[in-house]
Every structure is written in C-alpha cells, then in structure tokens.
Image (cartoon, coloured by chain):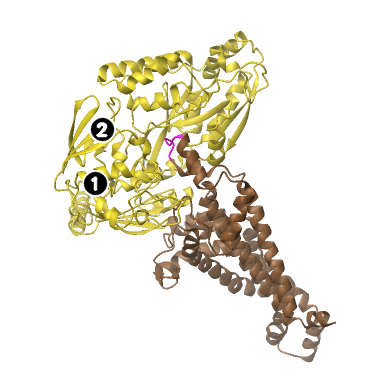
Amino acid sequence: MIGFIFKRFFQSFIVMFLVALLAFTMFNFLGDPVNQMVGIDTTAADREALRERLGLNDPLMVQFGRFVSNAFQFEFGQSYQHKRAVSGLILDRLPATLELSFIAAIFTLVVGVPMGVYTGLHRDSLLSKIFMTISLVGVSLPTFLIGILLIFVFSVQLQWLPSFGRGEVVDFGFWSTGLLTASGWKAVIMPAVTLGLFQMTLIMRLVRSEMLEVLRSDYIKFARARGLANRSINFGHALKNTLVPVITIAGLQLGSLIAFAIITETVFQWPGMGLMFLQAIQVVDIPIMAAYLMLIAFFFVMINMIVDLLYYVVDPRLRVDSSN
Amino acid sequence: MGLRHSLIAVASVAALCVATGAQAKTFKWAFQGDAQSLDPHTLNETFTLGFLSNVYEGLVRRGPDLQILPSLAESWELLDPNHWRFTLRKGVKFHNGNDFNADDVIFTFDRVRMDGSDIKTKVAADTKVVKVDDYTVDIITSKPNPIVYYEWDNVLIMDKEWSEENNATAPTDVTKDANNYAAFNANGTGPFKIVERETDVRTVFKPNADWWDEAKHNVTEGIFTPISSDATRVAALLSGEIDMMYPVPVQDIKRIESNGGTATMTGPELRTIFLGMDQSRDELLYSNIKGKNPFKDKRVREAFYKAIDVDTIRKKIMRNLSTPSAIMVSPFLFSKSAKYERIGYDPESAKALLADAGYPDGFELSMDCPNNRYVNDEAICQAVVAMLAKVGVKVDLLAQPKALYFKKVLDFDTSFYMLGWTPGSFDSWNVMYNLLACRDEKATRAKFNLGGYCNPGVDKLTDEVLVETDPATRDSKIEAAYDMVAEDVGYIPLHQQGLAWAKKDSVDLVQRADNQFMLHFVNVK
C-alpha cells in the first residue's frame, strides 16, 4: 500500500513538472506582456527597461528554473496587471470558483441521477423522451450560449435572477461565501445550472445505460422470480450496482467543473479564478496564467490519485494482484 | 375621462417626486474591465485615469466639451516663454482631512517621473517644479512649451504626507514583491471617495461632502461593476440591474433603443483609425515584389486610398457609428479641420494609377491587423482586403490579438497595417511627433510611425510647432504639416470610431468625446 502511494506521488510529480514545462513553452507564443502593461505613450527605452527588470530577457530555461523553484514555495510572483502577489490573488478567487463548482456538482447529481433512473426504468414514457431531448440540448449547446439564453429568459424577460456577479458575500477572512445570503443563492443558480448542465446529461445518460444493463442481469431476474417488491429491486439492488462507475465519473468530473468554470464565470461575471485566467490571457499576465495552470493540474492530479486510492480500497481484486 | 386620467397621472408623478426627492440616489454602472490599480500613476490608460478622476484631481481638468478648466490650480500665467506660474486653490482638503498645498504638487510631479510610473511622458524629465510659497508653484521648462499643462488633467495630485505615512512615495513597481498601499487605497481631493473596493468585483463611491467645488450631481452612492462579457453587460442594463454601461457592442444598439426605458448615447470618439504603409525599406518585408518597394511610389499609395470605400465600411461594418476622416487627428481637436476632404472612392482611377506605377496586374502583400483592440477592427481589415482585391492587389490578412499584434508592429515588422491613435494631449503636436515626423535610428521620436513615412518639411514643422507660442502661427504651421501629409498620401485615414454608451432614460449624464465617464456629471431622476 505504502509503495503504491509513493509510486503515485512520484507520477503526479512528473505530471506537474510536464504541465509547467508545456505551459512555459506556450507563453512564448502569447505576445509581449510589456506592451500590455504600459500606456501607448511610453518610450521604447522605458519599455526595454521594464522588460529587463521583469527578467523577460533571460533565456527561457533560466526563467523556467526560477519559476519552478518559486512554485515549490507557493510563490508565483507579482501579477503584471493587478500589481499584487499572485498567490494572494488566487486565494481570494478560489472560494468563488470552488463554491460554484460544488453547487454545480450537487446539481448534476441531484438532478442527473433521478432522471437517469427514471429514463432507465420507463424507457418509452413521454417524460423519458422529454428528458432525453433535454439531455441532447445539454450535450450539444455550447456553455456560453446556454448562459446567455438563461440570462435572457430569467434576467431580462422575467427579472427573477441577477445576470451577473455573486450577490452579497460574507467574508470570513480566509474564505468568502455567497451561500449565507439570499442574493448569493439567487446569483449562483444560473451559473451553476449552466456549468453543470453538460455533466448532468452525462451522468443521466450513464445512469440510464447502466440501469438498462443491470436490469437485464441474472440477479435482477432472480430477484424478480423470488417476488421481491419492484421498489426494493430497482433501488436496493439495481441502482446500488450502477453507482460504482457513476461515482468514479462524478469524482473525475469535479476536476473538469473547476477547470471549465472559465467560460461560465466569464458569461456571468463570476469573480472566480477562471475569469481572472481569461483576462490574464488577453493581457499576457504570465504569473497568473502559470499559477492557474499549475493549480488546475494539481487538482486533477490529486483527484485522480484519490480515485485510484479509492479503487484500491473498494476493489479487492487490486489488492490481491499486488500481493501476488 | 381623459382629463381625469391625466390628472391622476400628474398627481401620482408629483407624489412620486416628493417621495423620492430626499431618498438615496444610487447609480450603478458597468464597463468591460476594471481599473487596474488605484495608484493614479501606474497606468496611462483612458479608463483607469477616468475612473480615478472621480477621486483624484489634477491642476487642471476638462469640462464636458473637453475645454481646459481650472481645478486644483486656480489660474496660471506665462512669465516668460520657459517659465509658468501656477496659483493653487486655497482651502482644498484631501479625503483624509490633510490640506492641499504646493508640497503635494512638487511631490506628485516627482512621483510621476520615477521608475514604475507610466505617466512619465506627461511631465518632461528636465522640467523644474519650484515652490514659491505654499500656494504658488513655478514650472520651468528647458524649451518653450505652450501646451505644457494640456495633459495635466491626468497628472493626478496625491497627498505627500499620506503617501509618506503609508510608504507609497513611489508608484507600484511590479518587479518588487511588495504590495503598494496606494494601489488599494485612494486619498484624493475629488468629488467622490472610494469607500469599498474589491478588484474586478465592485467599487463603491460616496460623495465627498467637503469638495471645494459645487456638486452638480445628485448621486449619493455610486457602484461600479466590471462586466467583461458584452451580452451580459447588455442584459444587465435591459434587466434594470444597472443604470449605465459602456461600451455598447454596435450590433446591440437597436436592441437597447427598442427596449422601453433604455437609450444609447453615441458620438464620434477622438480616436482616428488609419492604415499605414511601409515607405522606408527598399524592399517590402511581406510582398511578392522584390528589389523595390511599391509604397515608395505615391501613385501606389493614392491607388490604395482610392480603392477603399470608407462609406461602405461606415454603413455595413460600423453600422453608421463612425465618421470618415480626412486627416490624422479628430476634427474636434483641430480648428482648421473643416477644409480637409477625403479623396473620393474611385476604383477605376485606382487601377489606372497602379498600372501607371508599373503594376497593371496589382501585386501581393500582407497586412497586419489587431482583432481585439478597436471597434470591429478585424471586420474593417477584411473589408479593406476585399476592396483592394477589386483593384488587383491581393492582400494576405494577419489579424491577431493585440498582445501579438503590437509585439510585431511596434518592432516595425510590417508592410501594411491598421492602427488607431488618440493624441493624449488632445493636440496636434502629439500626432505630428508620434506619427508624422521622420523616425530616427533609435526611434526616439515618431516611434508609432510604423511605416517610416518621412517628409523633412513635416519633420521641421514638428519641432517648430512644439516651441511656437503664438496660437495663430502655431495653427497655420500645423495646417501646413497636414497639407503635406495629405499631398504625400503618407497615411490613409479611415474614420473616427464612434463612442457608444447606454443608459436608463431616468439618468442624465455627459458623454465626453475622450470616452471618459465622470460620475460628477450624473443626475438620477
């Protein structure tokens, strides 16, 4: 077990390093940060001096080495645009993104699983067909379009929900939350639905196909033959067995919810990391981009590792294999 | 019946007025981005400076029509051509209660010239600022400069004591790992105070009750929110969540107009969009013509000019939100601009000119264009490409985000490009010095003359205009320079891009042609 964890840690470390290297190579093609940092009147000499002071004239490998050694100490330098330490900026923005992602994840499960079960059990009912059509929309429409549609209906036409922002937030110093105020909850509905819609349809379709599979299996037939109640068969036996792959996917999807919040955050002006990242790309704010990419890579690596470890715990076959 | 109804209506409107008269007037507005810092000297950018001008003030300020008005300086006079005397306003207090005096002016003028400041160009390095007494400051320039104070509306005065107490005597420097106090806190003399700020989320303004000038606004609270997505910004206005927003995407103007209770405000901006051509190299970098540079031939430049139908661009791409330009400066900023007219659209004549110049079948070249800098920039370039194709010139368009575009063209690595220019001083000398004068080896002057257009006559006039103190002579020299550029077809001016703001009908505000929005011009009904 210990050996397995060590191996995993080592692999994660290599992944992080490769992400850093790839990201850093890409930054070279993004353009010149200095021209974005100064007004148009600034002289060429002043621009060159700034470039020198930022260390942008150093060879790429030197810049990369400096970045890696700083990143180990959770030190990502100063944002060119915000003129603040990037680590502080990220910590400020993290709560908004994580809250949005968790609400979206809960939405995908709470709505997606029952819809999947229903469509699995009643394949030909009208409601199932409606659900399947909705899921098709969720899969095929791009996120920003769904967001804009929701804004058009619920903000502009009905005026029920705010079109932008996070509402009122309560600040605890290390964490700011919008989940303690009514305006905060109202503000999170549309972004969470927009962000979660794709994953929700994914979960729904997964549960549906798993249900269909399981319902055909021998032990379900046997249970029916024994005369067990439908309810007990469907939920006690069938659903329980479909949930193993669902939990795996849901866990992995949490990482993508955090990473893909970029577009949703931009549409709803949600003050999270994704919005900051997108703005950083436009102005070539390398310290923010680097830190964000590393953080997302870190999330993915951690979630993957936890899922792997859970397999190890859940699936006895893995343990047997490694002890042989 | 009708009369009774209208009487009831009048009565209820009157009742409403009485009821809301004493109430809080909150004004909410949105822009596509946030001010980058509260430090007034770290970025020379229209929005950031406009935003901070609600809190800080300069020695002078600009009114609704951009006329220069006294602000923290009550008056100024020219003692001799190099020597200005500024009399400061007495009894002005900063938001923290400190008195404003000559020391603050001297402190600020030093601070804007330090490393890390982006306002350096507004006060020349060799200009001396001398304290005469607490409320008089002398400005001594090395050369006569009649427009020395033209950009000082954007040299925002900071409190010396406050800056020293908070260790913010130098502008925020990104290369040092210290968060500058002045980047997150503001202490000016202006009509509003910032009471709450969360970068990129919201900023709350409250009126400064001790402001030295009489307040013309009735705002009791101003809330600013950046909303970067165009569609969301429009939706926020339509749903009534905000009172005003800008910029308005041109395609949404109709939508906002047709909605009850909202309206757009449009007008020409000061920015001139133009095309530039590499006229300095002996061979173009990006063309199939080798061994010579077609743009060195005036006939080719004129043919390009005549091939472009600027009215079609105005109607189809800018949806009438642009004004075609004949000179390289906004007509608003030069007294004699009325006499200039664009060369008419004439593709036949363009073809003839190209044939004359030895290119009867045209030629190929590439064009550089930004795609996220100006209003519909990429679409304009695409139209230009199509129009030039009609006269036989095959243009390969390279449209890039501004970060990549400016990196390329500011190194003069271009043959044909589109650029926009607003003179920071609102004066023609800035245009002459940056765009029209001859570029020298090190590009210390004319560094935005990316095509290297050079007419020694214009170059000489540029130096003369700088030191000419008689307004009439100065204007005729500027005129002479513009005449020469027009005669040379040194540039192809396209249009003044339009400003588009949108607001609720219930608020009154002033749209300035420099695209700066000022909270103290706002009245909420």
Residue that appears at 41% across and 72% down: A172
* Label 1 to label 2: alpha-carbon separation: 25 Å
Residue A240 x %, y %: 70, 82
Residue that appears at 35% across and 17% down: B479
Q: Is residue A212 covered in magenta? A: no
Q: Is mark 1 on a helix, strand or loop?
A: helix
Under mark 1, the amino acid is Asp
Residue that badge 1 annotates: B104
Please state if A122 lies on the left or on the right of B369 as rendered: right
Q: Which of the image's four quarters has the N terminus of chain A?
A: bottom right
**Do we see residue B514 in this rendering?**
yes
Residue B8 x %, y %: 20, 55
Indicate the colour of chain B: yellow
The subunit letter for the residue under badge 2 reads: B
Contact between marks 1 and 2 (CB within 8 A): the answer is no
**Do we see residue B525 in this rendering?**
no
Please state if B291 lies on the left or on the right of A85 as rendered: right
Please state if B343 lies on the left or on the right of A107 as rendered: left
Residue that appears at 45% across and 51% down: B174
Under mark 2, the amino acid is Gln
Residue that badge 2 annotates: B67
Is B503 or B151 nearer to us in this picture?
A: B151
Q: Which of the image's four quarters has the C terminus of chain A?
A: bottom right
Q: Which segment is the magenta one? A: A39-43
Question: Magenta stretch mostly in which secondary structure?
Answer: loop
Q: Which chain is brown?
A: A
Is A322 or A78 nearer to us in this picture?
A: A78
